[in-house]
Structure formats: C-alpha cells, structure tokens
Amino acid sequence: MATYKDANYLQQSSSEAFDRDYGPGAAARHAGIYRCMGCHREIGIAADHVLPPQGHHAHTPSQGSIRWRLIVYADHKPK
C-alpha cells in the first residue's frame, strides 16, 4: 500500500482517472503510482510510459488477471 509522511502534499480527488483499469503493456495516461488490483503490487511510472508487460509478475488463479489502476496521481505541471 502506498504510504506518505506529510498529508500536506496530497489532496483527495474523485476524478474518474482513478476508476479505470489498464492491462499489461498499456500506456499510462497519468504519471503516478499504479497498483495491480489482483496482487496489490505497486509501481511508479511516468505519463505515457508503458505499464509492465504480462510476464512482469505472476498471479495465482484467485488473483485473476493483471490489471493496473492509478492510485496516486503525480501532478508535474507548475502552478
């Protein structure tokens, strides 16, 4: 699970960007932390980079298919 020390650097969002799952090898639409919804492994990735391929890690049948979901968006645009 992603953790943090200072809540001042995070804000809650109800954006639909957090509701979509991506398959292995898909382009990450947003920079941030993505979590595999089957096994809960997390990765950090830059926007438009490719999420890990199918062979990146194995799942048991009970974990289902590998599906990545954005859990923390990294806003890289200056304010």
Image: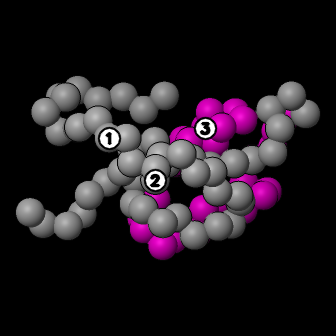
The residue depicted at 52 percent of the width and 64 percent of the height is: 28
| In contact (CB < 8 Å): disc 2 and disc 1 | yes
Picture coordinates of residue 45, whole percent (x, y):
46, 59
Which numbered mark, 1 or 3, is in the foreground of this view? Answer: 1
Marks 2 and 1 sit apart, C-alpha to C-alpha, by: 9 Å
- The type of residue carrying mark 2 is Ala
By secondary structure, the bulk of the magenta-drawn segment is best described as loop
How far apart in space, not on screen, are marks 2 and 3 (Cα)? 19 Å
> Any mark on residue 17, and which?
2
What separation in Å lies between label 1 and label 3 (alpha carbons)?
22 Å
On the picture, is 58 further left or further right than 7?
Answer: right
Q: In the rendered image, which quarter is residue 55 located in? A: bottom right
Q: Does residue 2 lie above or below 24 as drawn?
A: above
* Residue matched to label 1: 13
Q: Which residue is mark 3?
A: 41
Label 3, secondary structure: give it. loop
N-term mark: 2 or 3: 2
Query: From which residue to which does the magenta span run?
Result: 33-60
Labels 2, 3: front one: 2
Q: Position of residue 29 (x, y in %)?
A: 48, 66
Pick the residue in front: 69 or 16. 16
Sort mark 3 into few (<14), some (14-19) or many (20+) by Cα contacts within 10 Å.
few
- Give the residue type at disc 1: Ser
Picture residue at 46% right of the left edge, 53% below the top: 17
Between discs 1 and 3, the one toward the N terminus: 1
- Can the viewer see residue 12 in this picture? yes
Quadrant location of the C terminus?
Answer: bottom left
